[in-house]
Image (spheres, helix red, strand yellow):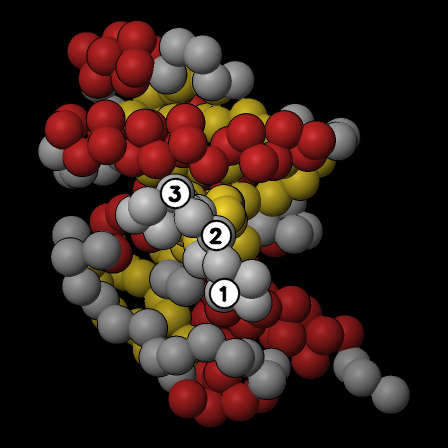
């Protein structure tokens, strides 16, 4: 019989695995822990399975090899990098949406179209295709809607515009799933510009100040 302690440990490790890297406050919010209890669990129960380090003067946690093996994770080792802030901000979005059970990070959306050759001819037995794709920062489904998440941290605005155009090409292939594209950004000026570019796409743009 699995003890309640082991079950809690596995559940928290699965959360860390799903998100990649977390702050203590993320675990507090997701698992309804106070700060003291969260620190106790980390130091006495999770420590064999995790790496702990500091990022921007705040402790962050991610799974070590033993932790990944313990829960049979299929993910590669996480490291602290220039993408860490982006990942931590994405966690804020995960919590904002009340921790969807089917949340997936870095999900590929792909649209396949049959293509003709340069002369406009399709040859029998020859499969030509024009693949259009975009990788969303996260994805989940709720109430018949497909939620697509974009976290605008320090991305150049020209890159945001290009990604929106990629969504514009790909999303018609998913219209039966009623996709809605959410952008989370840092400033009101960015929110205004993103909203303008997203016209014609079912969307919502929020600043991080609005969801905290």
User: Which residue does the numbered mark 1 point to in the structure image?
Assistant: 126
- Local secondary structure at mark 3: loop
Vertical placement of residue 164 versus 210, above or below: below
Q: Earlier in the sequence, mark 1 or mark 3?
A: 3
Q: Is residue 210 above or below residue 169?
A: above
Q: Is residue 80 above or below residue 94?
A: below
Q: Nearer the viewer, residue 140 or 94?
A: 140
The CA span between labels 1 and 3 is 13 Å
Circle 1 — which element? loop
Out of 90 and 33, give the one closest to the viewer: 90
Drawn side of residue 28 relative to residue 155, left or right: right
Q: Quadrant of residue 190?
A: top left
- Measure the C-alpha gap from mark 2 to mark 3: 7 Å
Q: Circle 2 sits in a helix, a strand or a loop, which is it? A: loop
Q: Quickly name the residue at label 2.
A: 122
Q: For residue 120, which numbered disc appears in the image?
A: 3
Residue positioned 52% across, 79% down in the render:
74
Residue 201: percent from left, percent from top: 47, 18
- Which quadrant of the figure contains the N terminus? bottom right
| Residue 193 at x, y percent in the picture | 23, 12
Residue 183 is tagged as: none
Foreground: 104 or 61?
104
Instruction: Tell whether label 2 touches label 1 (CB within 8 Å).
Output: yes
């Amino acid at each position: 019989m699995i003890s309640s302690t082991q079950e809690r440990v596995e559940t928290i490790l699965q959360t860390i695995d799903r998100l990649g890297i977390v702050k203590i406050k993320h675990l507090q919010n997701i698992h309804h822990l106070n700060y003291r209890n969260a620190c106790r669990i980390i130091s006495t129960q999770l420590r064999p399975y995790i790496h702990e380090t500091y990022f921007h003067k705040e402790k962050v946690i991610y799974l070590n090899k033993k932790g990944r093996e313990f829960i049979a994770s299929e993910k590669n080792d996480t490291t602290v990098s220039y993408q860490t802030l982006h990942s931590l901000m994405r966690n804020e979005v995960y919590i904002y949406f009340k921790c969807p059970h089917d949340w997936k990070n870095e999900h590929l959306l792909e649209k396949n179209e049959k293509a003709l050759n340069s002369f406009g001819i399709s040859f029998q037995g020859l499969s030509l295709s024009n693949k259009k794709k975009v990788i969303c920062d996260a994805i989940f489904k709720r109430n018949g809607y497909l939620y697509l998440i974009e976290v605008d941290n320090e991305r150049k605005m020209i890159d945001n515009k290009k990604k929106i155009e990629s969504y514009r090409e790909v999303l018609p292939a998913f219209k039966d799933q009623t996709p809605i594209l959410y952008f989370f950004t840092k400033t009101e000026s960015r929110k205004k510009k993103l909203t303008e570019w997203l016209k014609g796409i079912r969307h919502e743009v929020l600043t991080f100040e609005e969801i905290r």
